[in-house]
């Protein structure tokens, strides 16, 4: 029986999710037995026009070339799955959307900005094409990828864990760093999927897996204020990696205006 074909496409991103995919160890070996990988540049496999059953997309859509290419990926793929924060919520690149500062950044960063061609905004893949499933995280982990592939190939909608990192802390018996150390942990509003990685190592969550379901950003904001964070730091907590995710955008935007008004 022919194995299903998959592709991994890169757009504006750091390649970290592709590397997480490659570093998945036994999960990757298991995946390689299930599927035929047709395009995955980080793994040295190139056929970007391949027609596939599942296309994973890493990175935000930031240039007109990417806009054309993502439409081709959609046309050539049965399922499109976003891979990580950039593809799912714009990633760090979307920070420039906050105050339409694209041109200012180009001139501040590049010696010859006239050679830099970008769209006005860096946006999630779902802003441009229909997406079948989104994998959050910066980066994703191999178990998430393998589970999504297996479930899609079995013809079921992949499980989408949306409960909060705090729930995972309880399951993992991790000591709460907010309660015991007063750290500004974003676990109460962040979706799980990482296994409460940061709290298990004694540090606060910085929300790289994006918004959880039924999140209370007002209470979270009040708690961060209660811990003494100024508006600019509260803005950074909500807007750091997933600034285009609507719940985090809405929560962080007022603090961004207040905290960076004089910048
Ligand atoms: S450490 Fe953070 S994620 Fe874990 S229970 Fe406390 S607030 Fe929640
Ligand atoms: S604990 Fe938070 S910041 Fe750390 S990996 Fe998990 S979601 Fe990301």
Image (cartoon, rainbow, N blue to C red):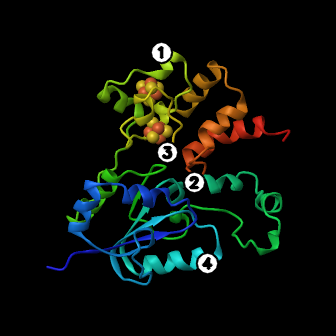
Question: Residue furthest toward the right?
Answer: 262
Placement of 197 over or under 242, stated as above or below: above
From mark 3 to mark 4, how far is it between C-alphas?
Answer: 27 Å
Badge 2 or badge 3: first in the primary sequence: 2
What residue would you read off at disc 2?
A: 91
Q: Is residue 175 left or right of residue 36?
A: right
Callout 2: SS = loop
Placement of 110 over or under 235, stated as above or below: below
Badge 2 or badge 1: first in the primary sequence: 2
Badge 4 or badge 1: first in the primary sequence: 4
From mark 4 to mark 2, how far is it between C-alphas?
Answer: 19 Å
Callout 3: SS = loop
Q: Determine the residue positioned at 39% across, 34% down.
A: 196
What residue would you read off at disc 4?
A: 65
Q: How many marks?
A: 4
State the residue in front, 225 or 139: 139
Q: Are marks 1 and 3 in contact (CB under 8 Å)?
A: no
Badge 3 or badge 4: first in the primary sequence: 4
State which quarter of the image contains the C terminus. top right
Badge 4 or badge 2: first in the primary sequence: 4
Would residue 214 be seen by someone viewing this image from the given angle? no
Quadrant position of residue 200: top left
Quadrant position of residue 54: bottom left
From mark 1 to mark 3, how far is it between C-alphas?
Answer: 24 Å
Q: Determine the residue positioned at 37% across, 38% down.
A: 163
What residue would you read off at disc 1?
A: 180
Q: Determine the residue positioned at 55% across, 50% down.
A: 245
């Amino acid at each position: 029986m022919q194995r299903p074909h998959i592709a991994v496409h890169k757009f504006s991103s750091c390649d970290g999710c592709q590397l997480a995919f490659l570093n998945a160890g036994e999960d990757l070996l298991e995946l390689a037995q299930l599927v035929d990988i047709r395009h995955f540049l980080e793994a040295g496999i190139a056929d970007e026009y391949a027609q596939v059953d599942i296309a994973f997309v890493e990175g935000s859509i930031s240039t007109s070339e990417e806009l054309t290419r993502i439409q081709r990926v959609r046309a050539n793929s049965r399922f499109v799955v976003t891979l990580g924060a950039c593809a799912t919520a714009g990633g760090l690149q979307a920070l420039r959307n906050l105050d339409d500062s694209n041109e200012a950044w180009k001139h501040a960063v590049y010696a010859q900005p006239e050679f830099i061609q970008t769209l006005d905004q860096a946006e999630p893949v779902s802003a441009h094409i229909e997406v079948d499933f989104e994998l959050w995280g910066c980066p994703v982990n191999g178990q998430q990828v393998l589970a999504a592939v297996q479930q899609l190939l079995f013809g079921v909608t992949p499980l989408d864990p949306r409960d909060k990192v705090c729930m995972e802390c309880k399951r993992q018996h991790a000591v709460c760093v907010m309660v015991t150390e007063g750290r500004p942990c974003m676990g109460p509003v962040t979706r799980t999927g990482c296994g409460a990685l940061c709290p298990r190592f004694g540090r606060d969550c910085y929300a790289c897996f994006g918004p959880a379901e039924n999140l209370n950003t007002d209470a979270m904001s009040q708690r961060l204020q209660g811990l003494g964070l100024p508006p600019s730091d509260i803005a950074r907590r909500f807007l750091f990696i997933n600034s285009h995710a609507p719940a985090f955008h809405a929560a962080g935007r007022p603090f961004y205006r207040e905290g960076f008004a004089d910048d």
